Amino acid sequence: MHIEPGLVAEGKIWLSYVTAAGAGAYTLKLAADAVAERGVVSLIARSLATTALVFGFFEVLPHHPVGVSEVHLILGSTLFLIFGVAPAAIGLAAGLAIQGVFFAPFDLPQYGMNVTTLLVPLFALASLSSRLVQPNTPYVEITYRQALALSTTYQAGIVVWVAFWALYGHGLTVENAASIGTFGAAYMLVIIVEPLVDLAVLAAAKALHGLRGTPLFERRLYDAA
């Protein structure tokens, strides 16, 4: 994923460092909670899995530049449901960094914007899930409507943050608004596909019920809160 270089001028990019630092600090808090709940080995294992998957999402799955950024099938809600919020956040940040360092160094100046755009919607998704999914419902039992709400929250959050960076960088012009609109419309395709992927992955996890209790997966995947 990358927000187009030059979208935010060098003199204004400092704001992305502030937002990324805030997202990073909250990720550390979530990581500490995860260690307290499941132990450091579980967190490391799940974070390595999400990092590998995120890197694959960025480099292997189709991605196309549209408007002010690129459209990716990032599957943030899938990562959250299978591995938990802290490993998902770590994987998104680490996968994005690996992509930037080794394959897209021109993206590194935009890393703060990109990581903020990926992480803050994930935190919103996690907050919504605590209200949307009843405590007695494991994730393998969620409905299509619930999966759609989670996916829409994540992808809409990405669109909102990309729009914010575009407006922050270039202001409200006709050309900029049109470019933002094109990007947002393209992301509607992701909102259609991701809930189906979520349900397919959850169905596979349900069939593999022998994985319950393993440290590689989110505990809530199989067990009620």
Image (tube, grey):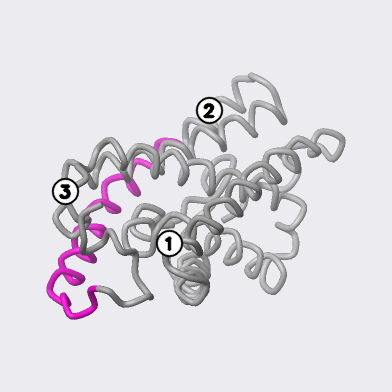
**Towards the viewer: 128 or 36:** 36
Looking at the rendered structure, the secondary structure element under dot 2 is: helix
Q: Is residue 186 visible?
A: no
197 part of magenta stretch: yes
In percent of width and height, residue 163 lies at 56, 31
In this view, 169 is above or below 49: above
Q: Residue furthest bottom?
A: 210
Task: Point out the image quarter for the N terminus.
Answer: bottom right
**Towards the viewer: 47 or 112:** 47
**Towards the viewer: 154 or 177:** 154
In percent of width and height, residue 5 lies at 72, 48
On the image, numbered disc 2 is attached to which residue? 178
Q: How many marks?
A: 3
On the image, numbered disc 3 is attached to which residue? 136
In percent of width and height, residue 86 lies at 49, 57
Q: What is the three-letter code of the residue carrying label 3?
A: Asn
CA distance for labels 3 and 1: 19 Å
On the image, numbered disc 1 is attached to which residue? 37
Q: Residue at x 18, y 71 (%)?
A: 204
Left or right of residue 170, residue 221 in this image = left
Q: Earlier in the sequence, mark 1 or mark 2?
A: 1
Looking at the rendered structure, the secondary structure element under dot 1 is: helix
**Towards the viewer: 183 or 152:** 152
Residue 156's quadrant in the figure? top left
Q: Earlier in the sequence, mark 3 or mark 1?
A: 1
In this view, 210 is above or below 132: below
